[in-house]
């Protein structure tokens, strides 16, 4: 659905708030959840590429297929959108201005 919506109504500006977040779960009801402060604000003119950069700063592979890594139990919506021609998840093809991904890395899995 996400890929279809992006195709039907293209997004002109994608902004991802990575200033403060949680790791190891999506809410306080998850045992072991922890607060983290990456201190990042990520913006881009292509939502697929912007999500790919954000995913990489979290320590995950934005090109991982369903069944692998963080996408172990779900589809990788970035790859679905990429297959529709809505953007790329290939970090080598994405221009990153400002802090390089390697310096912005905040692992969410540890």
Image (tube, rainbow, N blue to C red):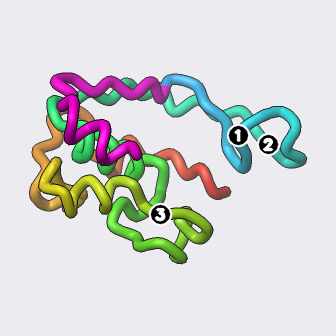
Q: Which residue bears the numbered disc 3? A: 75
Q: Secondary structure at mark 2?
A: loop
| For marks 3 and 1 on the same chain, the one whose residue lies earlier in the sequence | 1
Q: Residues within 10 Å of mark 2 (few under 14, many from 20)?
A: some
Q: Secondary structure at mark 3?
A: loop
Front position in the image: 82 or 54: 82
Using residue 68 as the reference point, say whether residue 31 is left or right of it.
right
Front position in the image: 7 or 107: 7
Give the percent coordinates (x, y) of residue 2: 38, 43
Q: Residues within 10 Å of mark 1 (few under 14, many from 20)?
A: few
**Is residue 41 one of those drawn in magenta?**
no
Using residue 23 as the reference point, say whether residue 40 is left or right of it.
left
Q: Tell me the mark number nearer the camera, choosing from 2 and 3.
A: 3
What residue do we see at 72% from left, 50% from top? 24
**Is residue 10 one of those drawn in magenta?**
yes
Residue 30 location, quadrant: top right
What residue do we see at 41% from left, 50% from top? 55
**Alpha carbon of mark 1 to alpha carbon of mark 2: how far?**
8 Å
Q: Which residue bears the numbered disc 2? A: 33
Q: Are marks 3 and 1 in contact (CB under 8 Å)?
A: no
User: Which residues are the magenta region?
Assistant: 1-18
Give the percent coordinates (x, y) of residue 40: 41, 28
Q: Which residue bears the numbered disc 1? A: 26
| For marks 2 and 3 on the same chain, the one whose residue lies earlier in the sequence | 2
Where, quadrant-wise, is the C terminus in this rendering?
A: bottom right
Give the percent coordinates (x, y) of residue 90: 20, 61
Give the percent coordinates (x, y) of residue 16: 39, 28
């Amino acid at each position: 659905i996400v890929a279809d919506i992006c195709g039907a109504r293209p997004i002109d500006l994608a902004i991802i708030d990575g200033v403060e977040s949680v790791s190891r779960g999506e809410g306080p009801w998850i045992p072991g959840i922890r607060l983290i402060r990456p201190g990042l604000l990520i913006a881009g003119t292509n939502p697929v590429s912007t999500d790919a950069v954000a995913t990489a700063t979290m320590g995950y592979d934005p090109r991982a297929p369903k069944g692998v890594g963080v996408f172990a139990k779900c589809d990788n919506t970035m790859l679905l959108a990429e297959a529709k021609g809505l953007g790329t998840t290939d970090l080598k093809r994405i221009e990153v201005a400002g802090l390089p991904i390697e310096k912005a890395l905040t692992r969410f899995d540890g």
